[in-house]
Image (tube, grey):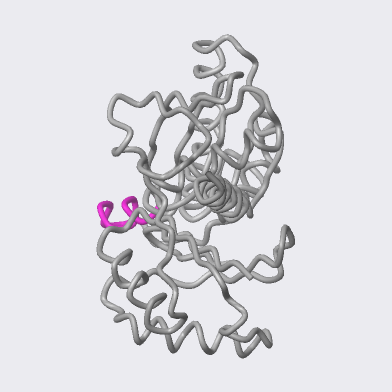
Amino acid sequence: MLLVIDVGNTNIVLGIYEGDRLVTHWRIMTDRDKTSDEYGILLQSLFAARSVSPDSIKAIIISSVVPPVAPTLELLCKTYFNIAPLLVGPDITLGMPIHYDNPREVGADRIVNAVAAFEKYKRSLIIIDFGTATTFDYVSPAGEYIGGAIAPGIHISSEALFQKASKLPRVEFVTPERVVGRDTVTSMQSGIVYGYIALVEGIVARMKEEVKTNPYVVATGGLAFLIASHSKAIDEVDELLTLKGLKIIYDRNMQKVQMSKSK
């Protein structure tokens, strides 16, 4: 079985594939201070809760946008699974040309999402990932990663409002019934939720106007369903898009290894 790990600034998402089937998956908090042993004990607990044997893991692939955590997880893989993981980066086989000015600057998760989405739809795409930051990525009809936009995430925006405005409270992230709030809490919720919907719709509209290819819009990330339920700018939500992309990239690299061995 294949263990796929996506390390984000806020959460780490893990999944186990048996063949092409995603058997199970978890979301845990990213902790830059955790040691490899602490992560190892946590993984052992997660595996035990789902009756998964660590010995069943035969390969691991990791994408990370948090540099301090990647070496920790790499050590975990070697110590607890006796496996050297495949790390997603510009030096491995992605199966997608990267037309960023400096490909090493592109977050691994953005590339993984792009690979997964194009493999499924085979057309021009805008991929929106609602994470710590909200990213908008454009893939051409030929399957080339072109670039995109990065905006502050929803939680970052709402937390900054609470921290910087003395009289404003921290509010629950829910959709109010009206845009015109009648009290401070619902006014803040309106501004955060409907303001963010407008941000998403505005960037998508401008990207479509610029690229002129009528891209299909796919969203992923924890709050994708909430925004998509109030906006026609998003065509589809796939919250497991990154895990699917990791599986695809792993397979492509194993095919390359097998081909080189057969020569």
Left or right, 239 with reference to 209: right
Residue 229 x, y percent position in the rendering? 70, 43
In magenta segment, residue 58: no
Tally of numbered discs: 0
Q: Which residues are magenta?
A: 158-167
Image quarter of the N terminus? bottom right
The residue that appears at 37% across and 83% down in the rendered structure is 79
- Which residue shows up at 64% across the image and 31% down it? 217
Residue 173 location, x and y as percent? 53, 57
Residue depicted at x 41% and y 30%: 149
Dividing the picture into quadrants, the one containing residue 21 is: bottom right
Residue 117 appearing in the image: yes
Q: Is residue 262 above or below residue 21?
A: above
Side (left or right) of 97 relative to 232: left
Viewer-nearest residue: 50 or 219: 50
The image quadrant that residue 141 belongs to is top right
Q: Position of residue 175 (x, y in %)?
A: 62, 50
Q: Nearer the viewer, residue 171 or 18?
A: 18
Measuring from the top left, give residue 254's x and y in whole percent: 55, 53
Q: Is residue 162 magenta?
A: yes
